[in-house]
Image (cartoon, helix red, strand yellow):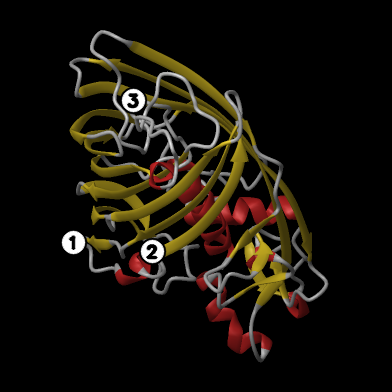
Amino acid sequence: MIASAIRRGAAPVLLSLVGSGTPNEGLADDATVLPAGVSRAYADFYRYLPTTQRYNRDGDREELAFQLTNAPLDSSVLASLQPLDPLVGGTATIGNVAVAYEYDISVLDLGFSYGLTERLTVGFHLPYYWITNHVATSFDSASANVGLNPATGTCCIPIAAGGQPMGEGDVQNLIRDQFGFSRIETWRRQGIGDLELGGKYQLSRTEDTAWAVTGGLRVATGYADDADDLTDVAWSYGNHALLLRLHYDYKLSNLWSEERTPLRAQAPVPGDVVMNATLRYDYMLPDKQIKRIGDDPDQILTANRERVERKLGDLFGLEVSGSFQLSESIAVTALYNYASKRKDDISGTMGFNYESLEAHTDSSQHIAIVRAR
């Protein structure tokens, strides 16, 4: 329960940040390539507003640590308390914990592309992340019916038999000693994201249309999930992936314009309307990662720990956009993006319930953007 809130809270951030970078022309999601011998570099900085909420699978907002709002730490969560259930005539509990998270995220998006030939452009994309998870914790022992043994200072004996209610520090030590997790506190980290290397080849180009295909590799150079840290925020899936993109551009305004202009004119022409569609496919290469495996998806406070074999679900995407050139210097673009991820396939050799790691790993998202530049 306690860890599942953290892990599921981090998942939407992971999905959105891994795909947040949008390289400029040359490796962008359109059919444009650079002329031979021409290079282009870019650096975009994104400062996201701090957030304490996320969207769940039903599209409703909830707290990042929604399962830890007045969450009981009882024998259903802490298996070590189960032998005490008969002694207290019900469910043994040490009290309730409340944890809140606030994600603070900044991203510097770097890229470079070079026209190797008139039809082939190569380049790379590398983001850099600054992420802080501000963690606020509190513990209420008012409902506790078991506590520390005053003779040994260890957990636990019934309060009725002289047990002493635990404090927040005692709870932190209990989770650390029983499960080997790091202390639950504010977490911060910075570093490079996953490196993307690729090449775009323009298949055909006419006055009105252009087709191109991009192939590449995403290298897992970013920070992946730490199985022993309940508060970290990963910005990498932790595995390598093969990338494939198919781009199509169409100069829609040539249908009604008295003077037809090339799809990619040297200078923007007011009144031009260009449509673009891009299909994306990321083939996630198998890998091995250390994971905690609960008996069910909600039990991640567990000592079950193994280096499992993973085949993460492949990523699919469709992006459709239209750009209207208002003037020589200003264009308005409307964009729709759909992305989906298939279910993960996890296996191991220690006999744990690996299906608990596969649950809820499929996902989809819809994004609509209107911008002027």
Q: Residues within 10 Å of mark 2 (few under 14, many from 20)?
A: some
Viewer-side residue, 280 vs 5: 280
Name the spot of residue 160 as percent of width and height, x first.
77, 80
Which amino acid type corresponds to the residue marked 3 in the rendered image? Gly
Q: Is residue 116 above or below residue 6?
A: above
- Circle 3 SS class: loop
Is the residue under label 2 in contact with that under label 1 (CB below 8 Å)? no
The residue carrying mark 3 is 26
Q: Are marks 1 and 3 in contact (CB under 8 Å)?
A: no
* Rendered-image quadrant of the C terminus: top right
* Residue closest to the eye, 367 or 172: 367
Q: Identity of the amino acid at label 2?
A: Thr
Q: Earlier in the sequence, mark 1 or mark 3?
A: 3
Q: Nearer the viewer, mark 1 or mark 3?
A: 3
Q: Secondary structure at mark 2?
A: loop
Q: In this view of the protein, which residue sits in the foreground, 114 or 264?
A: 264
Which amino acid does the dot numbered 1 rest on? Thr
Separation (CA) of disc 1 from disc 2: 21 Å
Kindly identify which residue carries mark 1: 349
Secondary structure found at label 1? loop
Q: Is residue 245 above or below residue 189?
A: below
Q: Marks 2 and 3, how far apart in space? A: 33 Å
Viewer-nearest of discs 1 and 2 = 2
